[in-house]
Amino acid sequence: MLNRNSLSRRTALKGLGVSLAMPWLDAMRPGRAALAAEAVSSGAPKRMAFLFVPNGINLAHWTPKQTGFGYDLPSTLAPLANVKDDMLVLSGLTQDKGRANGDGPGDHARAASAYLTGAQPRKTDGADIRVGVSVDQVAAQHIGTQTKFASLELGCERGRGAGNCDSGYSCAYSSNISWASETQPMGKEVNPRAVFDRLFGEGTSKQQDESQQRRIALRKSILDFVADDAQRLHAQLGRNDRRKLDEYLTGVREIERRMELASQSTESDATIGFRGPNDVPNDYGEHLRLMCDMLVLAFQTDSTRVATFMFANAGSNRSYQQVEVPDGHHALSHHGSNPEKLEKLRRINQFHTEQLAYMLNKMKSIPEGDGTLLDNSMIVYGSGLSDGNRHNNEDLPILLVGGGGGTIDTGRHVVYEQETPLNNLFLSMLDRMGAPVDYLGDSTGRLAGLTL
C-alpha cells in the first residue's frame, strides 16, 4: 500500500496516445508540514467557472422573496433544491457596460461581451473588435501554469468570429464571453468528444489521432488502453482510494458510452442556423449534460482550474421542444408581458437550471480532501441581461455556487444596492483563487456579503 504522501497529484494512467489524469485521492493529501507551509486545510485546489445563458430571465420565477438564510426557491430555482445550502442567490448586481451608453442598439452582443469583462465593447462588425480581458483569463494568466490547461472554454452553439450578428456588433461579441486580451476572444469548443480527447490525449498529435482511430476501429474504451497501469495503481491504494478510483473509472466509461450514442446522429436546427459534427448529440439537454461532464472531469482531474461555458450564444433563437416550447427563445424574450410567452420563458429558464443542477449535484457527489469538489469550487451562473424584453442590465440574475475552499458562507439570498458592479464579485473570486488584481473593468472594490 502507498504511503500517505507518496502519490503525486500529477499521477496519470498511461497508454498509447492516452494519459488519464487521476481524481483527488487520499494518498495525494499533503503531509502536515506541507499543509502548514501552504496554509491549505485539505490540500485540494480551488476552481472557478462561469456559465452563461442568453436572453435574460423571467425574474418573477427566479428571485426569492426572502433574504438571508431560509429563502424560498421559486420555480426556476426549484431544480437546485439539493444544492440550496451550497448556493448564494445574488440580487442587485449590475453590468453597466452592457448598456448602450450612447452606442445605440445591440444589447445582446454587448451583454455577452461585457458579462465577464465589465468593459464597453467597441461597436464594429469589422476586424477592429475591442472589449476587455475577462475574469477567467485574468485567473488563467496568474495560475494557468499549474495545470495542463490554463483554462477551458465550452459551449453548445458554434459562433462566427466576424460579420454582423447584432445591430452592427461583430459576431465575435455574441459568441464569446472569454477574452484573453482586448482584441482576442477565446474560441469555445462545442464538441464533447473533442474536449474529452483533449483532456486525456498524450504525446504528439499523430499519436493521439492514432489512439483515437484504434479505439474507434476496435470499439474499445480509453480505459482499455490504460488497463495495465490502472491495475497496478489499484493494487497499491488503500480501500477508500480504491473505491474512489473505481467510481471515477466507471464514470469515465459511462461518459464514453453516451458519447458513442451521440456519434450516431448529427444535430441540425434551422432555428439557430447550426449543423454540428457527428459527436454533437441531437438532444440539446444531453449536449448540455455532456459538456457539463467535461467541465467536471477537467476540474476533478485538476486538468484546469478555470472554465467558461455558454449554454447558447447571445440572442440565440433556439427552440425548446424538450419542454414543449416550439417558439424561438429570443423571439419569446420580447414577451411584452404576454402571460403565455412569460410561461414559455419560465419553462426554458427552468430547463436550463435543471442542467445546471445535474452538474452541481455531480460535483457535490465527488469527495475531495475534507469536503467535495463543489466545496472547493466557485460556480457563477447567470445572464448578461435581466429582463429580455427590457434589455436591462441591472439586477442581473446571478448565482454563486460552491464554498470556494471554505471561504464563502453559502445558503443565502443576498440583496445588494442597485448599480453594484458585477465585477466586484469577480475581484473577490480572484482573491480566493490566489490571483488578486486591483481592478477589473468597471469594478469599484471587493463585494461584501460573501462571508458573514
Image (cartoon, grey):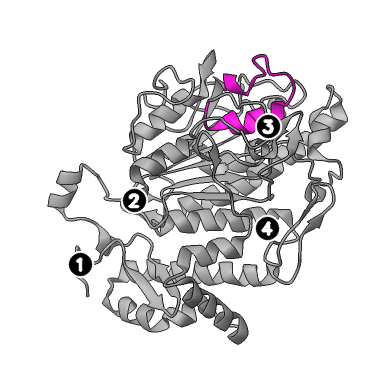
Question: Mark 2: which amino acid?
Answer: Thr
Mark pair 4, 3: CA separation: 26 Å
N-terminal label among 3 and 2: 3
Q: Which mark is residue 286?
A: 4
Q: What is the secondary structure assignment of the residue under circle 2? A: helix
Q: What is the secondary structure assignment of the residue under circle 4? A: helix
Question: Mark 4: which amino acid?
Answer: Glu
Question: Mark 4 or mark 3: which is in front?
Answer: 3
Q: Residue furthest bottom?
A: 218
Near-viewer residue (65 or 20): 20
N-terminal label among 4 and 3: 3
Looking at the picture, how far across and down is residue 104, in whole percent? 73, 18
Check disc 3: other Cα within 10 Å, few if <14, some if 14-19, many if 20+.
many
Which residue in the protein does label 2 denote?
A: 145
With respect to residue 271, does 396 lie above or below? above
Which residue in the protein does label 1 denote?
A: 6
Give the residues in magenta.
Answer: 95-118
N-terminal label among 2 and 1: 1
In the rendered image, the quadrant that contains the N terminus is: bottom left
> In this view of the protein, can residue 168 be seen by the observer?
yes
Question: Mark 3: which amino acid?
Answer: Ala
Mark pair 2, 1: CA separation: 23 Å
> In this view of the protein, can residue 56 be seen by the observer?
no
Looking at the picture, how far across and down is residue 313, in whole percent? 68, 41
Do residues under tags 4 and 3 come within 8 Å of each other at their CB atoms? Answer: no
Near-viewer residue (312 or 175): 175
